[in-house]
Each structure stands twice: as structure tokens, then as C-alpha cells.
Image (cartoon, coloured by chain):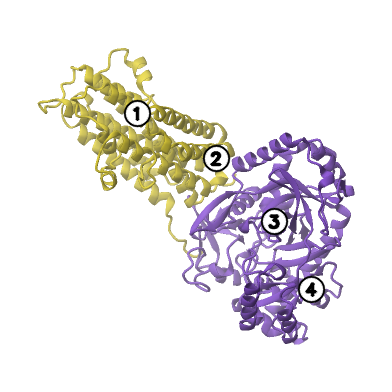
Chain colours: A purple, B yellow
């Protein structure tokens, strides 16, 4: 028996696929048609096939739990999330605009700091930030780009409008899952690709490769690009290995490399030492170089910052880029766009209150039951308070933390996240989701056709991170 | 033509992947054969499950956890105990960890086979300790390991990574074969009531069963029979396993495979010389005379030479020196 789509009701939330019970949005009509032809048994078959493919392909992610690293199979929902190409065009331009402005900002922060002098952004907000790196002052990386890979999370509210929720400029991950989700969908629901005109995502790795190559200090035909990973026990290791493989780049750990007396970076091979030009580093700033940052770090390369400052090696993303990856800075991004580009932002921020500001803090503390309070620096959805769903005790605890350390908290109204049909046991039900597109910036700028859609698998939950039990969907930009 | 590149760390992983999977296959095969041998031997022969532990040099580890060297404990120790560095559970786990860390170079199908092997041991290991289930468990494990070797040989480029993998397999295989010969010989020695060295021309029913099992534990029985066409003679078996140039698990053949792999690697003069010397020492041995006296020392010497080669591999490629300035 096939699922009864007339019974699918997203309520007051914007549903990505269904405009009303039983009726799909224009670009999703063919998708619905195909799913209507699958009865329960066939649907389960496809789900099983997807799980088997994921297991065999070894698509995993790691969760730190009970003191152990647990390798889990990637949680994937087979029903794709569909976005019309016409809508995506605007989003694409907005994302490119945003990253361009952010890179101008970071470059300014580490050089002339004009934006502080002109009073647009408070100096001590940035210079006092945990992500500000003094060692980066005076650096001018190639093309003025500091954040070469950016993951800006997007959400839609109940009016169907896209908002940027946050910008991830340090070590954003998830793109390999975007690529593998597409692979799995092609395996499990191939008939959909005949019917619909879906934009390809497979050019991402060659665009990444081009972006990285454009940063090379040596102007050679084939600069040596490496992907630097902390190793197999890191939660995103699968992605590090995947991207290296797809780009034909070497996957290295800190211990594979040394910095010579000439300040050049070399990797240790069975033939001796090979020069490295560009390092796509998937390691946090503080672990990059024990000479400069955390001396206990065994993950980095002693002297790496020295090599970078001498211009002998490029680091993507550059150290210090995280200064703009902060929920407090986020609140200023629309002004940052206006300041550097003299344009209005094409994509909006979610309204954000900075607890550091006295008046805004007062408002936040008075309205905790309506707001989402976030620490400015945590990731993975930890440390969050979802006011409307929290207990009084939780709200009181949050209020105490905010008063103690106001700089570290921002608040936003709870956005009614959009939903999409998701297979939950024997039912197909609406589940909230977000979207992480990836934007590349080097000599050129590229935006992924879609991105990684993350779904909160629990009914009513807004927490989509895989580390907290979220799943994901293939994302289609459909003509 | 661009020089092919291999990171030292990846080379090391491939080498150990080869060693651990070979170890897994050999352990599974040996366990199966061993059990069958013991059913055939008369009960008064002083040869039991404990000897299996000795082959692996795991006596200390075993006695730390078990006081009773009986079938149940030994089998559990060899198949499922994760704290035993030589169990199939451990070898398979380490094989997979090494594969995961160097996955880019291994063909996808081969990596998937490693996942299947791991699943097999993890899900069925502890439940396969009894006589009936054990045979099937081990046979399937051996098959999958052989599948891996087949997939590697037919879908992996014969690059440096491949050579390190084959090198690891060869070294481990040589090591295991030498241990099995050694134990076979020692057991025959021990089965003589007067303690004298075994007389080479006499083979009683017990010895026949023993040497047939030695051959089976390295999958050599069929090929031995094609070569010798006679009944099983101890000296012939040892000669076959030491020196036959065609049988893949003989020591000579293993060294040959190692030499071939090493021949493809950079800066290999010194280590090739070492392998050559080990091979010469092997060829010089007079099997008939050694069966009378000195066989165990001879095998000891071989194992020492092998250990030297292993150490040299490590020094040459896995831990290169720092660069000087340009």
C-alpha cells in the first residue's frame, strides 16, 4: 500500500516539497509522482538499498560518546529536498556577496583596521575575540582571500524566505556528504534523474582544486596541494580522505610534513622530501603549529606559521579567518557588506540581539521564553537554549550565564524552520531542516548547486547536527 | 615521466595491512587444520592445543589470562580475545585500521572486502568457538582473505604502495611458514620416547598425520603430492617447504616475492643484499643432515635474518631523515 500523501500536513511550517496536503510545489511534482508509485514494500526496499550502499561505500561519521570514538553509518533520508533554480539564483549571488565582504573584513582586521576607525564595528569585539590571531597581523594572502572555503548555513521561515543563520569560516565540513548523498540517490532512485532536470554537484572538487591551486606561491603548472587531516579518529576524517581522493591531492597528517631551514614545507616520502605549495588544512588554528600556538599539539607542523608568513606555503583557510566566524560578528555582517561593497545585502540575517549591548541584553533576559540563546563560539548545536521549549530552570541557568559572560551570548527569535517529507519508521512525516551550501573564494568565487541539507530526525526538533542525531537529504536545484 | 610518490606513513600502513591480513588468513587456516589433526592423533601423544599457542609465541599472554590450556580457551584466545595481539579479532581490527588510514590507495572493492572480513569476525567470532561452527568460520575467513589478495592483484596498480603490501604479505608468510616447520619438527622430536633425533627414513602413522597437517596448514598438501608422488616423508616435507621454488608458501618463494617487491622500490641496494644473504643461507642448508641435528637452529637463523630485513625496511622507508636547507 502506498503512502497517503493527502494526509501529509506540515501545519504552519513552510514545507519544501508540499504546498498543501496532497499537492507538491511545481518543481517537486515529478518527484511526488514517482514516490506515489512506490508502495510500502518498495519504499522500504529503496531505504534498505540506500543503507546498504552507505555501509559498503564506508560513508561514516564519528561521534564522541561515552569516552569512545564511535564510527556510525551516515544517516540519510532518501527523499530529496528540492529548490527551484530561479530561487537559488538569488541565494547564490547573496552568498558570493557575503563571502566577498567577509574576506575584505578579515583582511582589514589584520591590516589597516579601517572598519574600526570608521566606527562600524567595535574594535574590542574583534580584537578581544578568541579567534583573533595576533600572528596574522600584516599578512596579505593571495587575492585578499582568508576564508577560501565557507559554509554559510541557511534556513527558511514560514514565509519561505531564506535567511543566513551563521557563517562557518574556520574548518566547515559536510561537503563530502553532499557529494555522496547525490551518489547514493543516483544508485537508489535512478528513475528520478531521467524525469527531472537537476543541477550537478560533481564539479565541486575540481572547483576546490582550482581555488586551492590559485593560492600557490610557486607559479607552476601543477602546484602541490595537500589535504591536512588530524587523522582517522577525527569526526570528519571521511571527508578529508574523500576530498583528497577526488582532487588527486595527497592526504597528509602533521607528522608527514616538516618545515626546512629554507622555510619551505616538505612531505616525507619513500623517495625523500617533496615540496608542498598549498595546504588545505582541516585542523583548527590552535593545533597547527606547536612553535606558535598550542605547544602540546601533536597534530601540527613546527614552523608552519613561519612558512606561511614567509610566503613559502599557502594555508586554506588562512589562520585567523575565524575572527569573522563568531555569532557576535554575524550581527554586524549586513553593515560589513554595506561598508566594503557599498551594496545592500542580497541575503538577510536572522534578527540578532547582542547580549554585550546593555539594552539588547535587557530585552533578551526579559524574553527568554521566546528566544534562542546561543554561545558565540560553540558549534555542533551544543550550549544552546531554545527558550520556548526550555524549562524554567534551564532558562534561569541561561540567564545566569548571560549575566556572567555577556560577550559570549547572542539571541535570536526562534525561526519556524521549514520542513520536508522524511521517512520516519513506517510513516512519511514533516521534519525540520536547514541547508549548508559551500562557497569557494580564491582567484574566483564558486557556490555549490545546493549544499548539504540537514534534517532533525525527531519530531518537532530543530536540532539538525549529525553529532546530535540529525540526518541528511540529497539537495536538488531543479530547473 | 613524473616520479611516483608515496608518503612514508602510507607505505608503512600498506606494509602492515599486508602483514595483518596474511596473519589473519594463516591463523584461521592453522586453527582449522590443527583441530582436525588433534582428532586424528592417538591420545597418548604429547601434543595438544597448548602447542598452538607456542607457534605464535603467545605463551605469556595466554597464561596471564587462562590457567587451563584446553581447547575452549585456546580457541577463544586465538579467535576472539581482543587483548591477544595475535588473535584474528586483533589482526582484523588492525588490518582495517591500517586500511582506513591509507584508503585512497586501495581499490574500493578490496576495502569493502576488509569491511566484510571485519564484520565476519566481529559478528561470528565469539559464537564460533565450538567444533561444529569453527570449521565454517575459519574456512569463510580464509576465503575472504584470499579474495582480498585476488582483488588487489587484479585491480590495484603495481605501484610502490602495492609493493609494500606484497612485501608485508611475503614477510609475514615466510615468518608463519618457518614457525610451522619449526613446530612440526619439534613435535616429532618430542614424540620420540627416547629423546633421540628423529631417524629420517622412518615415518610412523603418527608422524604421517603430523606432517600431513603441517602441509595442510600452509595449503601445501596437494602441491606436495604432485611434486613427490610418494607417501609423506618428514625430510621431504621440510625440504619442500624450505626450498621449493614454485610453491607460494615455501620460504624460498616468499623470499623471492619479497625480493621482487623490493626490486621495485627506491634505494633498495642494501636491503636486497640482505635478502640475498638470507636466501643463500637457506639454500646452503642440507635438509637431510639438519633433520638429524641443527634444524631448529637453522630455522632460528632464518627468522633472525627475516627480522633484520623487517628492521631495515622500517629504517629505509618509514622514518626518513629531516631535510637540509635548499
Vertical order, B177 against B63 (above or below): above
Cβ atoms at labels 4 and 1 below 8 Å apart: no
Any part of residue B280 in sight: no
Instruction: Give how far apart the Cα atoms at labels 1 and 3 are.
Output: 58 Å
Query: Image check: A205 left or right of A241?
Result: right
Instruction: Give how far apart the Cα atoms at labels 1 and 2 are.
Output: 28 Å
Q: Which residue is mark 1?
A: B250
Element assignment for label 3: loop
- Depth check, mark 1 against mark 2: the one in front is 2
Quadrant of the image containing the N terminus of chain A = top right
- Residue B284: x %, y % from top left: 25, 30
Instruction: Give how far apart the Cα atoms at labels 4 and 1 are.
Output: 75 Å
Q: Which residue is mark 4?
A: A351
- Please report the residue visible at 12 percent of the width from the left and 25 percent of the height from the top: B193
Q: Quadrant of residue B85?
A: top left
- Depth check, mark 1 against mark 3: the one in front is 3
Element assignment for label 1: loop
Chain ID at mark 2: B
Query: Image check: B247 left or right of B4?
Result: left
Any part of residue A350 in sight: yes
Which mark sits nearer the N-terminus, 3 or 4?
A: 4
- Depth check, mark 3 against mark 2: the one in front is 3
Are labels 3 and 2 assigned to the same chain? Answer: no
Q: Which residue is mark 2?
A: B111
At label 2, counting other C-alpha atoms closer than 10 Å, the crowd grade (few under 14, some 14-19, many 20 or more) is: many
Direction front: furthest residue: A392
Amino acid at each position: 500500500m502506498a503512502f497517503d500523501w493527502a494526509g501529509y500536513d506540515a501545519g504552519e511550517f513552510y514545507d519544501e516539497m508540499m504546498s498543501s496536503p496532497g499537492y507538491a510545489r511545481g518543481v517537486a511534482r515529478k518527484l511526488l509522482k514517482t514516490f506515489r508509485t512506490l508502495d510500502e514494500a518498495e519504499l522500504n526496499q529503496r531505504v534498505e538499498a540506500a543503507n546498504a550502499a552507505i555501509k559498503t561505500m564506508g560513508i561514516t561519521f564519528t561521534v564522541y560518546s561515552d569516552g569512545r570514538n564511535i564510527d556510525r553509518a551516515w544517516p540519510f533520508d532518501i527523499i530529496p529536498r528540492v529548490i527551484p533554480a530561479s530561487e537559488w539564483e538569488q541565494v547564490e549571488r547573496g552568498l558570493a556577496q557575503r563571502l566577498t565582504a567577509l574576506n575584505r573584513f578579515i583582511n582589514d582586521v589584520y591590516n589597516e583596521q579601517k572598519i574600526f576607525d570608521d566606527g562600524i564595528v567595535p574594535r574590542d569585539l574583534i580584537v578581544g575575540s578568541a579567534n583573533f590571531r595576533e600572528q596574522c597581523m600584516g599578512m596579505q594572502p593571495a587575492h585578499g582571500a582568508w576564508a577560501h572555503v565557507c559554509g554559510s548555513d541557511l534556513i527558511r521561515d514560514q514565509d519561505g524566505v531564506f535567511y543566513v543563520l551563521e557563517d562557518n569560516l574556520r574548518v566547515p565540513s559536510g561537503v563530502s556528504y553532499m557529494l555522496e548523498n547525490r551518489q547514493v540517490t543516483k544508485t537508489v532512485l535512478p528513475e528520478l534523474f531521467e524525469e527531472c532536470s537537476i543541477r550537478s554537484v560533481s564539479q565541486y572538487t575540481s572547483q576546490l582544486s582550482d581555488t586551492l591551486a590559485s593560492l600557490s606561491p610557486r607559479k607552476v603548472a601543477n602546484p602541490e596541494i595537500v589535504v591536512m587531516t588530524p587523522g582517522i579518529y577525527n569526526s570528519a576524517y571521511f571527508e578529508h580522505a574523500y576530498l583528497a581522493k577526488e582532487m588527486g591531492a595527497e592526504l597528509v597528517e602533521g607528522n608527514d610534513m616538516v618545515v626546512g631551514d629554507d622555510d619551505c614545507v616538505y612531505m616525507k616520502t619513500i623517495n625523500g622530501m617533496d615540496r608542498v605549495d598549498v595546504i588545505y588544512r582541516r585542523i583548527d588554528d590552535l593545533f597547527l603549529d606547536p612553535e606558535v600556538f598550542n605547544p602540546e599539539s601533536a597534530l601540527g607542523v613546527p614552523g608552519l606559521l613561519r612558512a606561511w608568513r614567509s610566503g613559502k606555503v599557502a594555508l586554506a583557510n588562512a589562520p585567523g579567518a575565524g575572527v569573522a566566524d563568531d555569532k557576535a560578528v554575524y550581527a554586524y555582517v549586513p553593515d560589513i557588506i554595506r561598508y566594503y561593497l557599498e551594496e545592500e545585502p542580497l541575503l538577510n540575517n536572522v534578527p540578532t540581539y547582542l547580549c554585550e549591548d546593555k539594552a539588547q541584553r535587557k530585552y533578551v533576559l526579559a524574553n527568554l521564553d521566546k528566544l534562542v540563546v546561543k554561545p558565540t563560539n560553540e558549534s555542533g548545536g551544543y550550549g544552546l537554549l531554545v527558550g520556548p521549549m526550555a524549562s524554567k530552570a534551564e532558562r534561569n541557568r541561561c540567564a545566569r550565564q548571560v549575566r556572567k559572560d555577556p560577550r559570549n551570548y547572542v539571541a535570536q527569535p526562534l525561526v519556524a524552520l521549514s520542513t520536508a517529507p522524511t521517512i520516519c519508521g513506517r510513516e512519511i512525516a514533516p521534519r525540520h531542516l536547514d541547508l549548508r551550501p559551500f562557497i569557494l573564494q580564491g582567484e574566483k568565487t564558486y557556490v555549490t548547486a545546493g549544499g548539504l541539507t540537514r534534517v532533525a530526525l525527531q519530531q518537532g526538533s530543530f536540532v539538525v547536527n549529525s553529532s546530535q542525531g540529525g540526518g541528511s537529504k540529497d539537495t536538488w536545484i531543479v530547473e | 615521466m613524473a616520479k611516483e610518490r608515496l608518503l612514508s606513513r602510507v607505505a608503512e600502513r600498506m606494509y602492515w595491512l599486508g602483514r595483518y591480513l596474511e596473519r589473519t588468513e594463516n591463523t584461521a587456516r592453522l586453527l582449522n587444520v590443527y583441530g582436525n589433526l588433534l582428532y586424528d592423533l592417538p591420545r597418548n601423544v604429547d601434543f595438544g592445543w597448548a602447542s598452538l599457542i607456542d607457534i605464535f609465541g603467545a605463551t605469556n599472554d595466554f597464561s596471564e589470562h587462562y590457567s587451563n590450556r584446553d581447547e575452549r580457551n585456546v580457541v577463544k584466545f586465538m579467535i576472539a580475545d581482543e587483548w591477544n595481539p595475535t588473535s584474528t579479532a586483533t589482526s582484523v581490527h588492525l588490518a582495517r585500521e591500517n586500511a582506513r588510514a591509507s584508503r585512497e590507495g586501495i581499490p574500493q572493492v578490496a576495502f569493502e572486502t576488509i569491511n566484510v572480513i571485519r564484520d565476519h569476525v566481529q559478528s561470528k567470532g565469539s559464537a564460533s568457538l565450538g567444533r561444529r561452527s569453527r570449521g565454517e568460520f575459519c574456512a569463510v575467513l580464509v576465503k575472504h582473505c584470499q579474495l582480498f589478495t585476488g582483488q588487489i592483484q587484479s585491480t590495484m596498480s603495481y605501484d610502490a604502495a602495492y609493493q609494500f603490501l606484497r612485501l608485508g604479505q611475503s614477510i609475514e608468510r615466510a615468518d608463519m611458514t618457518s614457525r610451522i616447520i619449526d613446530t612440526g619438527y619439534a613435535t616429532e622430536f618430542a614424540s620420540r620416547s627416547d629423546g633421540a633425533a628423529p631417524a629420517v627414513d622412518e615415518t610412523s602413522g603418527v608422524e604421517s598425520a603430523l606432517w600431513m597437517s603441517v602441509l595442510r596448514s600452509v595449503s601445501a598438501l596437494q602441491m606436495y603430492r604432485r611434486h613427490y608422488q610418494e607417501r609423506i616423508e618428514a625430510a621431504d616435507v621440510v625440504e619442500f617447504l624450505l626450498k621449493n621454488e614454485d610453491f607460494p608458501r615455501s620460504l624460498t618463494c616468499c623470499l623471492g616475492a619479497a625480493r621482487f617487491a623490493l626490486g621495485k622500490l627506491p634505494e633498495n641496494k642494501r636491503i636486497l643484499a640482505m635478502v640475498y644473504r638470507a636466501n643463500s643461507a637457506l639454500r646452503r642448508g642440507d635438509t637431510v643432515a639438519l633433520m638429524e641435528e641443527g634444524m631448529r637452529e637453522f630455522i632460528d637463523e632464518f627468522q633472525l635474518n627475516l627480522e633484520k630485513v623487517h628492521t631495515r625496511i622500517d629504517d629505509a622507508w618509514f622514518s626518513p631523515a629531516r631535510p637540509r636547507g635548499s
